[in-house]
Image: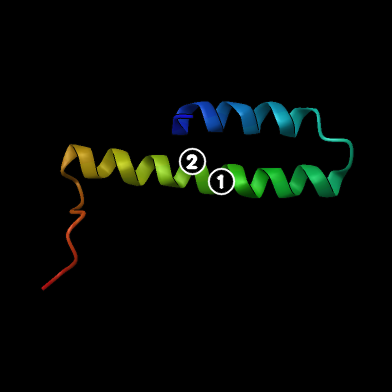
Amino acid sequence: MTNEQHIEELRAEARAAATLEERRQIEAELELAIAEREVISAELDGRISAEPPF
């Protein structure tokens, strides 16, 4: 599953969550997946380096 697919699946799960607590847990995971997507994008664009500093 790609990161993009995971994000879309989490969005769907959040909309269908049975309880507020469940929705909040899913939304927290969704935030992490979106942040990961942004890091990957920044690495690919050269805005940040994937290499650790010296």
Q: Amino acid at mark 1?
A: Glu
Residue 48: % across, % down: 21, 51
Q: Residue furthest bottom?
A: 54
21 horizontally vs 26: left or right: right
Which residue is painted at 51% across and 43% down in the image? 33
4 horizontally vs 23: left or right: left
In this figure, which residue is indicated by the disc labeled 2?
A: 34
Which residue is painted at 21% across and 38% down in the image? 44
3 horizontally vs 45: left or right: right
Q: Residue furthest right?
A: 19
Residue 41: % across, % down: 30, 38
Q: Secondary structure at mark 2?
A: helix
Residue 45: % across, % down: 19, 37
Q: Are marks 2 and 1 in contact (CB under 8 Å)?
A: yes
Rendering quarter of residue 38: top left
Question: Residue 19 got which mark?
Answer: none
Residue 18: % across, % down: 89, 36
Q: Residue furthest left?
A: 54
Which residue is painted at 54% across and 32% down in the image? 6
Q: Is 37 in front, or is 1?
A: 1
At label 1, counting other C-alpha atoms closer than 10 Å, the crowd grade (few under 14, some 14-19, many 20 or more) is few
Q: CA distance from mark 2 to mark 1?
A: 5 Å
Which residue is painted at 64% across and 50% down in the image? 28
28 horizontally vs 14: left or right: left
Rendering quarter of residue 46: top left
In this figure, which residue is indicated by the disc labeled 1?
A: 31
Q: Amino acid at mark 2?
A: Ile
Q: Quadrant of the C terminus?
A: bottom left
Q: Secondary structure at mark 1?
A: helix
Colour treatment of the image: rainbow
